Image: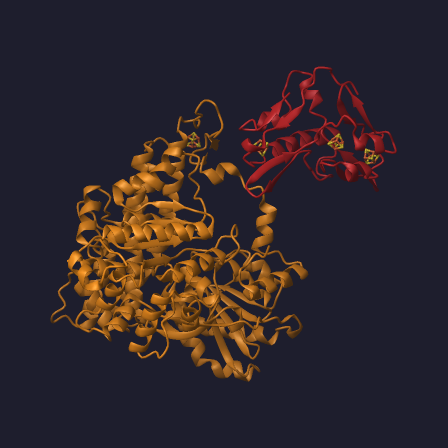
Chain colours: A red, B orange
Amino acid sequence: MCIPKELKFLVVDASQCMGCRNCELACSSRKAAQYQAEGILGNIRIVPNIFVGQNGLTKTPAYCRHCSAAFCKDLCPAHAISQENGVIILDKDKCLGCGICEQVCPYGVITLGSFKIGDKTKTIAHKCDLCFDQQSVGKEPACYAACPTKALALV
Amino acid sequence: MNDCYNCSDQSLIEKAESEKIDLVWQRYEKMKPLCGFGEQGICCRICMKGPCRINPFGKKRSVGICGASADTIVARNLVRMIASGTSAHSLHGKEVAKTLMHVARGETAIYSVKDAIKLRNIAHKLNIETDGNDLIPLAGVVAANSLMDYSRMDEEEVCNWLKYTIPDARLKKLKSLGITTSNIDGSISDIMARTHVGTDADAVNILLAGLRCALADYSGMQVATNLSDVLFGTPQPVVSQASLGVLRKDAVNIAIHGHNPLLSEIIVDVAYKMQAEAVAAGATYGINIVGVCCTGNEVLLRHGIPLATNYLSQELAIITGALDAMIVDVQCIMPSLAKVSACYHTELITTMPDAKIAGVTHIELGSGDSLKKAELIIRKAIDAYKNRDDDRLSIPAEKNKVIAGFSAEAIIDLLGSINSEDPLSPLIENIVNGKIRGIVLFAGCNNVKVKQDHNFVAIAKKLMAQNILILATGCGAGAFAKNSLMNSEATENYAGNTLKEVLTFLGFEAGLNAPLPPVLHMGSCVDNVRSIDLAVAIANRLGVDLNQLPLVASAPELMSEKAIAIGSWVVTLGIPLHVGLTPPVTGSSLVTNVLTSELKNIVDGYFMVEEDPEEAADKIISIIEEKRLGLNLDSSLDSANNIEVLS
Ligand code: SF4
Ligand code: SF4
Ligand code: SF4
Ligand code: SF4
């Protein structure tokens, strides 16, 4: 994987989050496009990498913090998760679908998804990659771009 | 935390959970987060260039694609809610008026004039010549005068049901503001027209039109309530029971749910005649009709039919496993009933052409063969009873005594037994001498965002302890009925000393041999106009306007567009209104400010938002005291002095 150095990270100001879930929708749309390119669209449930929750009146998204000491990276038995230029990145080809990362992430932002190849079912983990493909061509991450109040900011 | 204040309801929620049936509370949790743009009223879907949302945090004031500001968008959304609520109520009223017209023309064998006195009183009220007019032709004239309120062309005129039902001073004020309505349907289409893309963009102008539409709502509700009384009888005090414990193991249980008495009255009549069939099917008690929501209130008041539940817990009636059929008409019927009833033996039946649910049995009532259709419906219930699974039965033990049926006429009759010359005087004297500090009308729905019924009960208990008399309608009345606040024991337990004294005196004078309840059940949500009729009678008797009375309204768990419409006319008539949830207007500080404060300078009434029930009660009490002060009333003054001050 080639993660550019100048990648921006997400922060959120919960007081400005409207709970509109546009970020979820945008993340899911990008995934749908990727799945289509991979030929598995319709064969896998689309789950975003960002999740908006509500507690009382406060609404806020949960998303990957790209932890400096990341449990997901440290505990992955397949070494499928690595850190490059501060970004915690998951290599789908190495992933065994064991679900350990999903269990250890303190923010609950890794999900497992399964799809069929022939008569076999393959399960892999999904996590936020900061839309590095977009960022490297000067575009904004999908969730940030879609956030109407910019409760999500880039730093 | 419990979802319902009522423990029996709560136990059924737990039963549903164990049976893995999702109810309104789970669906609400799953829906979270609720979109903040909608919550604040700043999402506009009025045209296809959008939808547009206004960023409430933006440094620059953002606008919609067409340039509409947050103020415009919030005001448009709000008045469209008022228009929808108005449509719901006034269509109900129009159907009742049309039915009365059919009676007058001899076109129906099903309905008749049941309350001739009421008909004559209405004619008198509407300034219709009654002398020498036979009953049936008079019914035709009253129906025509009511239907005129839906079709008048002359915009200078004022709807009959508005101008003849409010104090002169109020009418004058509304006229001077240019917000009286001449045509109920016209006021609704005015809202839809002016909120079309690129029409009215002045938030204040839009809101004023909203108030006019709300007065159309008021007029339509007057038609609905009053003409229903003519057709089905004016409610008189009646003793019954409430809460889901009214369902019976030994009966074919049929719930009637919705709002329109035109249909429920037929079901009630027909069920009565089919008792033997139910007994033959093994239900020793026969048929047990119970009410849900405002159809429930209508038949509770007129027939003493027990009230099973109000809005939010409607699904729980099915979860008891004891409900054999639920017959629904219009409004506030959760579409989820289809799925929930499919998990049980319960027959769900829709009956109105404009209120169907996909996949649900539809048997239309309202035409010539209604009696046959009603028989068919009852027979379906009896058949369903045979499939009841006793292992899944869980009827809560709790059922509470309810004294209901307090129409304005019933209250005045009751007071008249003390002073027939001046029936209102016992009530007025006690308000003047401070034994009753004031009157609060509770109305409106339940909302899943509040523990069901809790706001109603908590606020009312605090108010009655402070000697405030409480009137209730709609699902608010349902909340009090279910939770045992509509009986003499509640007066003993919760009313302040002087209120208790007055209610006890009145109860005995009226021959009930027990205190009147501290909360008087005035009917369904359209029946909110009954409380206005009472208030207007008091105001006229004192020669003051409605805004001067120590009278406050509260909708502490509101939810529907109808509630927004009612709330809007309540404030337009000059009465302060507490709401327990924030309406979707906070995206515009202008609109919020108009509703919560500026309105007071224009129409005297205003919205007071307070989500905490304890605080809300305190604020309501202080408004009542403020109003008393305005009338020169104080508890330390004696009644004779005050009457002089007033007159
Ligand atoms: S997935 Fe979870 S544990 Fe891994 S880096 Fe992101 S927030 Fe940290
Ligand atoms: S699911 Fe994949 S990425 Fe996650 S710990 Fe297991 S192998 Fe590693
Ligand atoms: S898009 Fe922005 S405002 Fe909307 S839910 Fe996501 S973070 Fe909150
Ligand atoms: S009417 Fe204006 S604000 Fe509303 S959706 Fe259309 S462009 Fe947007």
> Residue drawn 57% across and 68% down?
B346
> Residue drawn 59% across and 60% down?
B340
Examine the image and state in which quarter residue B64 appears: top left
Q: Where is residue A154 in the image (x, y as percent from the top left)?
A: 63, 22
Residue B469 vs B492, above or below: the answer is above
Residue A127 vs B185, above or below: the answer is above
Q: Could you tell me if residue B14 is visible in this image?
A: yes
Query: Viewer-proximal residue, B474 or B635?
Result: B635
The N terminus of chain B sits in image quarter: bottom right
Q: Where is residue B225 in the image (x, y as percent from the top left)?
A: 31, 62
Q: Which residue appears farthest toward the front when viewing the image? A: B636
Query: Viewer-proximal residue, B138 or B64?
Result: B64
Q: Which residue appears farthest toward the right when viewing the image? A: A77
Query: Viewer-proximal residue, B66 or B8?
Result: B8
Examine the image and state in which quarter residue B72 appears: top left
Q: Position of residue B325 (x, y in %)?
A: 53, 69
For the image, the number of numbered tags is 0
Q: Where is residue B286 in the image (x, y as percent from the top left)?
A: 51, 81
- The answer to whether residue B568 is left or right of residue B118 is right
Quadrant for ligand 1?
top right
Residue B378 vs A153, above or below: the answer is below
Query: Viewer-proximal residue, A16 or B229?
Result: A16
Q: Could you tell me if residue B547 is visible in this image?
A: no
> Residue drawn 43% across and 79% down?
B272
The C terminus of chain B sits in image quarter: bottom left
